[in-house]
Amino acid sequence: MLVLAPPHTGGPLARNADPPGRNYSGGMTATGATRSPLDAEDLRVRVQKRLDEFLCAQVSVLDDISPDLAPLSESITDLLRGGKRLRPAFAYWGWRGAGGADSEEAVTAATALELLQACALIHDDVMDGSDTRRGMPAAHRRFGRLHRGNEWLGSPEGFGIGAAILLGDLCLSWADELLMSCGLPPRSLMRAKPVYDVMRTELMAGQYLDLLEQAMGGGSAARAMRVVRFKSAKYTIERPLHLGAALADAPTELVVAYSGYGLPLGEAFQLRDDILGVFGDPAETGKPAGDDLREGKRTVLVATAVESASPAQAAVLRRRLGDPALDADGVEELREIIVGTGALDHVEALIEALTAHAFRALESPHVQEPARDVLHGLAIAATARSV
């Protein structure tokens, strides 16, 4: 849901945007616009090319099994045409920051994380009951419509959920396959495998903690922050950096610097995503306005509002949050409470503090160029307020 933008030149974020001695430009396009740091070394284009090649081979395997598997192939192909490629970017620049040379093998290893992300998105949409993903029907909705349109037996919703779970599992399997066949030396892969293993464990644990918070009706902001750390922060930035570092046989000092940069930045990233889930433009987020409020997501933003609410405000939050029929007026009422309790300002200040911490860690002498400048630009983009 996060919308990545070029570095800000003003506003509160800019106070932390350029520490002394740093002036990331990200490169300029032919029209003079600032180029996204995600496009350094043409990384997004190269990741998409590698995904297309890998999926073409996998679709052939599925076609050989049965033509009935075509909807699975089409669904994952459509999903993987979109996305910001954040995790591959942090893995690749983690490799480069450790002295790894640019190579197609390193890009392929980083690309595997996009398939892991696809698994997480598909399963997350099932658990949240989301209708859309990247401006398209979520996988379980898509397969539900397929069932309904063909007038098959049984429940369309049940079929959709089952198919989406299997599709997510398939992406998880493919992520392993792509990483292990990336072409880097076996000793590099053996160094990276423990990082990859713990990354997946933390992701699944974080997903469960998120599910638990929804079932319990939400808890404290501290509990919500724990979900942020394990469901998103480590998985999005810190562990991809560690993966790239392990592949390049980085020294311990660099791994520590990557944690000092990646963990707070990952938390800031998710907090920004949570704000956009409530206040973001649907044209940019790919989801209906206020969709996170309809789903009743127990984010740090919401938990902070609940902790600071007056009795009257708390009653509205209890009644409105998680209402799937929440209309535009209901969304606006909840937004006003979130602003009125000071929760929005609190989370914005937290994002600034976490981002500043990340910038300080990035000044480590162990981070090699040009990775340092690109990582600096990625930090600004990942916490931007909007496009």
Image: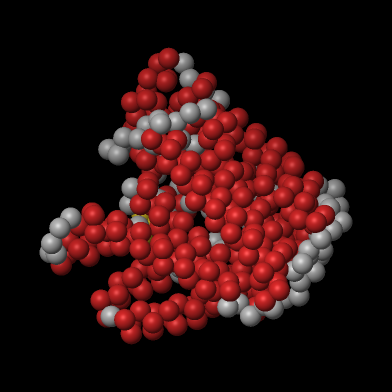
Q: Residue furthest top?
A: 311
* Of 384 and 69, the residue lying toward us: 69
Q: Tell me residue 115's x, y (percent).
A: 50, 66
Q: Residue at x 84, y 58 (%)?
A: 366
Relative horizontal placement of residue 136, taking residue 156 as reference (left or right):
right
Q: Tell me residue 42's x, y (percent).
A: 64, 73
Q: Residue at x 52, y 21 (%)?
A: 308
Q: Is residue 75 above or below residue 181?
A: above
* Of 179 and 291, the residue lying toward us: 179
* Location of residue 68 (image quadrant): bottom left
Q: Is residue 383 visible?
A: no
* Location of residue 332 (image quadrant): top left
Q: Residue at x 48, y 28 (%)?
A: 219
Q: Residue at x 59, y 43 (%)?
A: 229
Q: Is residue 157 above or below residue 102?
A: above
Relative horizontal placement of residue 362, taking residue 111 as reference (left or right):
right
Task: Tell me how many marks there are.
Answer: 0
* Of 370 and 365, the residue lying toward us: 365
Relative horizontal placement of residue 203, taking residue 155 as reference (left or right):
right
Relative horizontal placement of residue 278, taking residue 251 as reference (left or right):
left
Q: Is residue 129 visible?
A: yes
Q: Tell me residue 326's x, y (percent).
A: 31, 36
Q: Tell me residue 379's x, y (percent).
A: 68, 52
> Tell me, what colour scheme is on the image?
secondary structure
Q: Is residue 224 above or below residue 93?
A: above
Q: Is residue 300 above or below residue 258?
A: above
